[in-house]
Amino acid sequence: MKLRTRFARATAVGALVLLTPALTSCGMDFATDKVYTPAPGANDRSERVDVLNAVIVATADGSGTLVTTLVNNDVVQAGEPSGSADRELTTITSEGGTVEFTGPVTIKAAGHVRFSNDPVTSDRDGIDLPGIRVTGSFKIGDFVPVTLQFNEGEPVTVEAPVVPNNGHWACQDGPELTPNHLDEYAHHEPHTVTCPEPAGTTEEAIQADADAEAEANADASGTESE
């Protein structure tokens, strides 16, 4: 797999080192003592659909979970039919690796789709889907090229950093957390925590979105008939 220089090296000089506070992303008061430099996810805003904060969260080298948010910037223009500005994510690939994605996934006009194992749900304009499994020859600290193809426009490739399944990203790649530096020093084994259930599975999320749209259309029809 074609990889960029390890981001740990890229941020080693001149980086601001922060102490991670108690874990809140999984709804647990689980503190981590690891001191590290937070690395933002990869972003691309070159096409109609923005790819935001893309990372691969990995418990160990060689496999992980792709977490990202896709935002559709198009809106339905006056006189155009409903759905005309929707966009579809058709494929996700990674050079030299395998991405377990089954498409297409629709990103509605002015809406978003979040791939994440976070228990917090998106707002009414978004849909939550589970994080996407990725395997390959990457290691924690690498940058992995991930290409997203939509039904319109050019393919979008982002260099997603591979981050440990701990701290801010804990539970995104399952309940077995990546040991932090103090764990390794004390010869601790990777430890398992109880992760909250994700906001929704693929089938549940899609059905809930369809139900919400049907209810909104019914309300609109009722208002027009009055």
Image (spheres, helix red, strand yellow):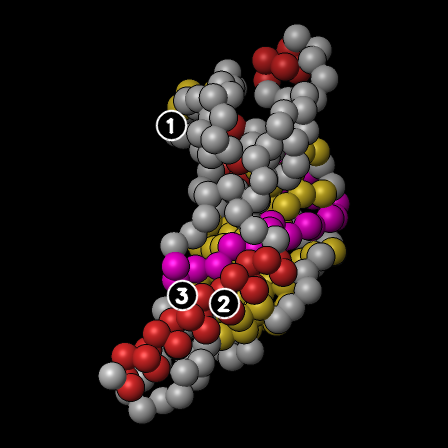
- The x and y percentages for residue 198 are 57, 44
In this rendered view, identify the residue nearer to me: 19 or 209: 209
Residue for point 27% across, 79% down? 223
Residue for point 60% across, 50% down? 131
- The x and y percentages for residue 137 are 74, 45
Quarter of the C terminus within the rendering: bottom left
Q: Callout 2: 10 Å neighbours few (<14), some, many (20+)? A: few
Q: Is residue 131 magenta?
A: yes
Q: Is residue 71 magenta?
A: no
- The x and y percentages for residue 172 are 59, 39
Disc 3 residue type (three-letter):
Gly
Q: Which mark is residue 16?
A: 1
Q: Is residue 203 above or below residue 62?
A: below
Instruction: Point out the stretch of residues depicted in magenta.
Output: 124-142
How far, Cα to Cα, is label 1 from label 2?
46 Å
- The residue pinned by badge 3 equals 111
In this rendering, the label closer to the viewer, 1 or 2: 2
Q: Is residue 206 left or right of residue 218?
A: right
Disc 2 residue type (three-letter):
Asp
Q: Is residue 4 above or below residue 125?
A: above
Q: Is residue 104 above or below residue 28?
A: below
Q: Which mark is residue 88?
A: none
Q: Callout 1: 10 Å neighbours few (<14), some, many (20+)? A: few
Q: From where the camera sits, is residue 192 visible?
A: yes
Is the C-beta separation of discs 1 and 3 under 8 Å? no
How far, Cα to Cα, is label 1 from label 3?
34 Å
Judged from the image, the secondary structure of the residue bearing numbered disc 1 is loop
Q: Earlier in the sequence, mark 1 or mark 2?
A: 1
- The residue pinned by badge 2 equals 211
